[in-house]
């Protein structure tokens, strides 16, 4: 499987999520440690990156909810690493701004705590590319439970 890269970039901010590997069958069998992501954040010159272990269903849910938030300009979602405790929270306010906050924890336990806000106009490519690859049901057990 080739890495799937999703990048959100402005002059001062970059969020990159790379899906390195996933196993839908393990997810269906109940193994919650079935998807490997590489996540990097660069926010106003401060940066951090780490490898995450997540459940494939969480990735599908994240892709679906981001699209729903973009379409309706409201809502919130989070995705969390099951290994070191990294987390990204995303919220869309009533003006169409997407607020990202969270922390990236490296395998050496260095921690970057971040928060930034982006107008919805920066979000479309990032959200729709992830939704095309992982949105809907895409082999997830979420809708089959």
Image (spheres, rainbow, N blue to C red):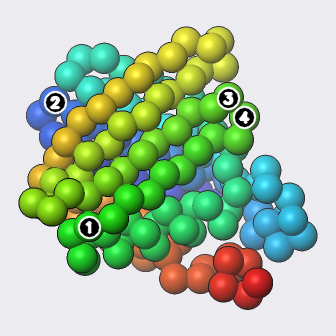
Q: Which residue is mark 3?
A: 84
Task: Between label 4 and label 1, give the one nearer the viewer.
Answer: 1
Q: Horizontally, is 32 left or right of 93 in the view?
A: right
Which numbered disc flags the more N-terminal residue, 3 or 2? 2
Residue lying at 31% horizontally and 17% vertically, measured from the top left: 46
Q: Nearer the viewer, mark 1 or mark 3?
A: 1
Quote the CA–CA distance across marks 4 and 2: 29 Å
Which of the marked residues, 1 or 2, is nearer the chain's N terminus? 2
Which residue is under mark 4? Answer: 83
User: Along the line of sight, which residue is nearer the eye, 99 or 16?
Assistant: 99
Label 1 belongs to which residue? Answer: 74
Q: Find residue 51 and name its label.
A: none
- Secondary element under disc 2, as helix, strand or loop, is loop
Looking at the image, is mark 3 or mark 2 nearer the viewer?
3
Which residue is disc 2 drawn over? 12
Residue furthest right in the image: 29
Question: Label 4: how many residues lie within 10 Å, few (<14), some (14-19) or many (20+)?
Answer: few
Could you tell me if the residues under marks 4 and 3 are in contact, i.e. CB atoms within 8 Å?
yes
Instruction: Tell whether 2 sits left or right of 93.
Output: right
Task: Say whether disc 4 or disc 2 marks the residue closer to the N-terminus.
Answer: 2
- The residue that appears at 50% across and 28% down in the rendered structure is 104
Task: Answer with mark 4 or mark 1, whichever residue precedes in sequence.
Answer: 1
């Amino acid at each position: 499987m080739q890495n799937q890269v999703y990048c959100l970039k402005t002059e001062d901010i970059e969020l990159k999520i790379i899906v390195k590997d996933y196993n839908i069958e393990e997810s269906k069998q109940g193994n919650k440690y079935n998807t490997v992501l590489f996540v990097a954040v660069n926010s106003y010159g401060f940066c951090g990156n780490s490898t995450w272990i997540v459940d494939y269903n969480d990735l599908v849910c994240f892709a679906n909810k981001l699209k729903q938030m973009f379409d309706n300009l409201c809502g919130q979602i989070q995705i969390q690493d099951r290994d070191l405790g990294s987390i990204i929270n995303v919220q869309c306010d009533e003006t169409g701004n997407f607020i990202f906050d969270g922390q990236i924890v490296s395998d050496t336990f260095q921690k970057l705590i971040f928060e930034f806000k982006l107008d919805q106009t920066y979000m479309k490519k990032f959200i729709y590319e992830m939704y095309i690859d992982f949105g809907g049901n895409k082999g997830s057990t979420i809708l089959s439970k």
